[in-house]
Image: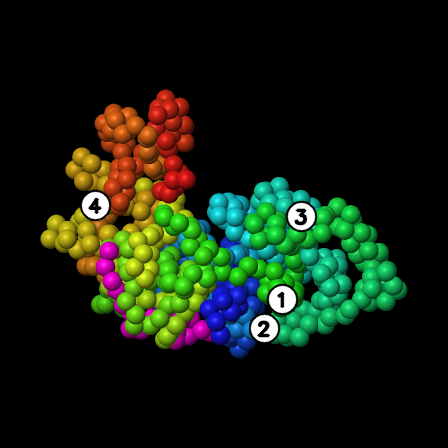
Amino acid sequence: MSIQQEIARRRTFAIISHPDAGKTTLTEKLLLFGGAIQVAGAVKSNKIKKTATSDFMEIEKQRGISVATSVMTFEYNDLKINILDTPGHKDFAEDTYRTLTAVDSVILVIDCVKGVEEQTERLMEVCRMRDTPVMIFVNKMDREGKNPFDLLDELEEKLNIRVRPLAWPVNMGQNFKGVYSLIDQKLNFFKVNKTRLEDDVLEIDINTPVLDEKVGQRDADQLREDVELIEGVYDAFDREAYLNGKLAPVFFGSAVNNFGVKELLDAFCSLSPEPVGRPTDKRPVTPDEKRFTGFVFKIHANLDPRHRDRIAFLRICSGKFERGKFYHHTRLDKDVRFSSPFSFMADAKAVMDEGFPGDVVGLYDTGNFKIGDTLTEGEDLQFQGIPSFSPEIFKELINLDPMKSKQLDKGIEQLTDEGVAQLFTLQPGNRKIVGTVGELQFEVIQYRLENEYGAKCRWVPMNYTKATWITAENPVKLTEFIRLKGNQIGYDKDKNPVFLAESDWILRMNSQNNPDIQFHQTSEFK
Ligand code: G4P
């Protein structure tokens, strides 16, 4: 098979949702339909229990499983599909944002009872930053949910994207009869069934009495009316607009009942994009380029605390990756080579001899990698679009054991390279400030510093709520601002100055009063 054919058959995507909407269930059902797993339950166990938010033993235990399930690869209809798992817990949102830089499209799961929830909106914002194509699956149709038309309006309004239903439900909740495909005019009849993979599908002309016989006159009339309205109100589905991230096709179903999942998967296979190009600091890279390039979007600590090696997840962006070949690590300006890179077929790891754009390679790492690092065949470039977002909670890291300060420094360096949290240094006294999006990370860091590095620490909460990266066209103005603001200025790990604000109001005031200074919400400035 040529590289072009290999690229054309790959689909790399993530499933995202507000916790509880059904992401895990849908992931599992897609794997089931794809033949990657035989029984349900494999993915479920990866989920951090919602009740045990501060129980890291739980996280530790689950880490072993989650390496294997971080990427799930399976073959379906001659396509090679890579699902990149994203943590559902909101404290790990930044992990999700970074994973979204490594996918070519997403499926967004919505709970039909709850509609668009807080986390859904934030995730969509990240998708929109990169114009990632989005497909929406409205889940839990076996429950009494919102009116589907109202849901469509809500999606458009809150998610700031045009929508186009490609399937339509016949009633819902107790009276849920099935879903009518607006693509191929087939009606899929709903049955409560958690194990069946066969769908009960009928090709149907909804304007004939056959429909009345099948679903009853009331539901039949309603469906006819709905379909007429949809065809009248919505333009024909525009795939280009979907691929440009401007239009989201909408599907309905009930993941737990395996219902509507196959339609979603089939539509996904025919509509979703093959691997797309990515920007770098020098030039855009396209997948069909001969020379290999890729970047690290996730780093996973090893389960065994006695070994500090980690697993770096690399997304291949162009060319062919080969085992044992030397590649150029552009940040460190050195050549590196991997003797046992691995892929994530089914629910196990397997040695990967070669990989193609869209694939994710697992690389054993002894501390060479940082999120965003780029590998090439020699060209000096750095993939863009893996920004750090402003953390929301800040605490000062205090060393409790002066004999172990080296270990603590190394530990916090490495953990923040993994992207667990962000590290800022306050100049006077070199104080270390750690910023995260959730409380849970502080507990995880403390636990891991102790268990993996033998260093003990405690946290002192800081009043900051926002970190914004600052730049100015005139370097003199920037130096002046930094001098004036004193202890509100920190430096990130790349020594970029950051303004730490106690509130949005303070940030706004500083921004208004200092027109020469630009304040950036992420570490990558456009
Ligand atoms: P998440 O990953 O997005 O957090 O959601 P997850 O798949 O874990 O689903 C959250 C809950 O919603 C689960 O129930 C799951 O069974 C249920 N669920 C998923 N899809 C459907 C559906 O189509 N219809 C209905 N009625 N429920 C659905 P749970 O009680 O938290 O767990 P479980 O013990 O039932 O597995």
Total number of numbered labels? 4
- Disc 4 marks a residue whose amino acid type is Ile
Q: Cα distance, mark 1 to mark 3?
A: 22 Å
Q: Cα distance, mark 1 to mark 4?
A: 53 Å
The reply to whether the C-beta atoms of the residues labelled 3 and 4 are less than 8 Å apart is: no
x, y percentage for residue 85?
Answer: 46, 61
Q: Earlier in the sequence, mark 1 or mark 4?
A: 1
Residue 398 numbered mark, or none: 4
Q: Which image quarter: residue 503?
A: top left
Residue at x 20%, y 54% (from the top left corner):
410
x, y percentage for residue 422?
Answer: 31, 47
Q: Cα distance, mark 4 to mark 2?
A: 55 Å
Instruction: Count residues near mark 1 (Cα–Cα under 10 Å), then give few for <14, some for 14-19, many for 20+.
Output: few
Residue at x 75%, y 57% (from the top left corner):
171
Instruction: Give the residue at mark 1.
Output: 266
The reply to whether the C-beta atoms of the residues labelled 1 and 4 are less than 8 Å apart is: no
The reply to whether the C-beta atoms of the residues labelled 2 and 1 are less than 8 Å apart is: yes
Magenta includes 252? no
Q: Which image quarter: residue 415?
A: bottom left
Vertical comparison of 307 with 432: above or below: below
Q: Is residue 31 left or right of residue 213?
A: left
**Disc nearest the viewer among 2 and 3:** 2
Q: Cα distance, mark 2 to mark 1?
A: 9 Å
x, y percentage for residue 266?
Answer: 63, 66
- Disc 3 marks a residue whose amino acid type is Leu
Residue at x 38%, y 27% (from the top left corner):
511
Instruction: Give the residue at mark 3.
Output: 152
Magenta residues: mostly which secondary structure? loop
**Stretch of the chain drawn in magenta:** 333-350
Instruction: Give the residue at mark 2.
Output: 77
